[in-house]
Image: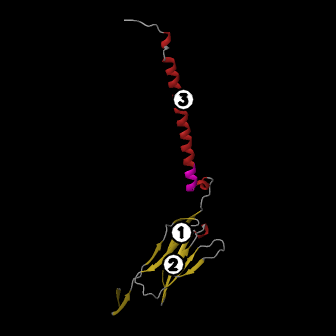
Amino acid sequence: MYRCDITYKGHVMTRRIQLKVIQVYSSGSAFMREGSALQLLCNVSGSDGGEKYVWTGPNPASGRRNQQDGAVLDLPAVQTGDTGVWNCSVYGKQGLVGQLQYMLYVHAAQVSAFAAFSSWPTYVTFLLIILLVLGLISAISWHNRRRRLLHLLARTTIDVSSLKKVEV
C-alpha cells in the first residue's frame, strides 16, 4: 500500500494507493508453430478475487478482434491468424485496473517430402536395409579373399610326385 500526501494552499490531502502488477504466464514461447496448443494466464498481484479478465486478440479474417472472458486464454491449435498483439484487460469494482499486451508469433507448419519419412518405422526399415547392404558387401569381400587365397595356395603347391628322391 502506498500513501501520497499533497499539500496545496495549506490543505493536506492524503491518498492511499495499492499497486497491482499485471503479468502474463505462457505455457509455450512467443514463437509458436501452427497447430500447437497455447495457454496464456493473466495474473494480478494483490488480487482480491473480484477482478474480471478479458482477453482480446487479432482476427484478420473477420476484421474484428477475438474476445474471450476469463484469466486463462486457451488456444488449443494456434493458427497464423492468431499472430499479433493479445491484450489482457483487468477490471475491478471501479472499472479498468490495467492492461497488458502479449505479442504472439505463429509460423506455418512446414510440409516437405522428408516429413513423410520422419516416423520411427521408416528409420528402422532404413537401418535394416543399410545393415543388409553392409552384410552383402562383407560376404562378397570374404568370398573374394578366400578365392585369392586358394589361388595363391594352388600356385605355391609343389607336386611331390615329380620330384626326384635324393639320398643323403
Mark linked to residue 104? 1
| Residue 126 percent location from the top left of the image | 57, 48
Q: Are marks 3 and 2 in contact (CB under 8 Å)?
A: no
- Disc nearest the viewer among 3 and 1: 3
Image point (50%, 14%), residue name: 159
| Residue 140 percent location from the top left of the image | 55, 34
Residue range highlighted in magenta: 119-125
| Residue 119 percent location from the top left of the image | 57, 56
The reply to whether residue 9 is visible in this rendering is no
Above or below — where is 16 with respect to 144? below
Task: Locate residue 49 relative to residue 74 in the image: left or right.
Answer: left
The kind of residue tagged 3 is Asn
The kind of residue tagged 1 is Leu
Q: CA distance from mark 3 to mark 1?
A: 64 Å
Q: CA distance from mark 2 to mark 1?
A: 15 Å
- Disc nearest the viewer among 2 and 1: 2
| Mark 2 lies on residue | 72
Q: Quadrant of the N terminus?
A: bottom left
Check if residue 124 falls in the magenta segment: yes
